[in-house]
Amino acid sequence: MSKQKTNIEIINKWITIDPKKIDKSANFLNIIQFYLFNCPVKNINHYSAVTVNEYGWDKGKLPKLKGDMLSDNNLKNRVFICNNLNDVELTILNNNLYGNQFTNEEFVVCWRNEKNIVEALLYLIRCAFAHRSFRVVKKNNEKYYYLANVDKGRIKGRAILKESTLLKWITNIQNGS
């Protein structure tokens, strides 16, 4: 079995989802609405979603938004933004973030793909929902979203984020600078 096929099989097991079993709570619907249908990353929606910039987070204010998003103690030293697509899989492997484990430790590994860091994070989440590459797991009364962005056999990103983190990010972005 090739390395690529093995890695994709691991990701597919990690994100297997049965649409009939999705908890369609108000929080879940809010998350889907924002990150999928109204994703605030420029040039990815064919309709007029409000962009991060239009929420008031222009280039000079993006470092504050990034800091607000990533300052949570659960994410400190667990966010890996890769400038090169080939580095995504290496980062996942080198930090032991690959297995089929269901953990409650938040992390993000994603490819920038010529986007700023905030947009790269949002794009990873959007792609996971758009391509049904996610799973929601409840542990210790908290919901965790297991997200993956896989395209043509290439892993572009992987994350575990708490539902509360995703909701906090929505509030931070929509409140503007």
Image: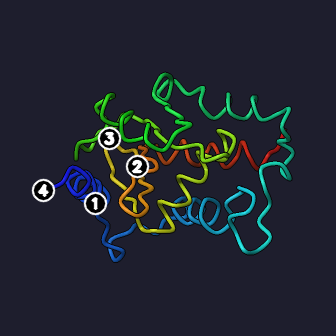
Question: Which label's residue is closer to the chain start, 4 or 2?
Answer: 4
**Measuring 56% from the left and 37% from the top, which residue is drawn there?**
83
Q: Which residue is mark 3?
A: 140
Question: Which of labels 4 and 3 is toward the front?
Answer: 4
Residue 128 higher or lower than 112, as above or below: below
Q: Nearer the viewer, mark 1 or mark 4?
A: 4
> What residue is shown with label 1?
12
Between 41 and 162, the one nearer to me in the picture: 41
x and y, in percent, of residue 76 in the image: 51, 23
Q: Residue 1, labelled with which disc? A: 4
Q: Are marks 4 and 2 in contact (CB under 8 Å)?
A: no
Q: Nearer the viewer, residue 24 or 60?
A: 60
Which mark, residue 143? 2
Q: Is residue 46 above or below residue 129?
A: below
**Residue 15 falls in which quadrant of the image?**
bottom left
User: Can you say which quadrant of the picture contains the C terminus?
Assistant: top right
Label 1 – label 4 distance at C-alpha: 16 Å
Mark 1 and mark 2 residues within 8 Å of each other at the beta carbon: no
Q: Could you tell me how far apart the alpha carbons at marks 1 and 2 are, in whole angstroms?
A: 20 Å
Horizontal side of 73 relative to 144 (left or right) equals right
Q: Which is more N-terminal, label 4 or label 1?
A: 4
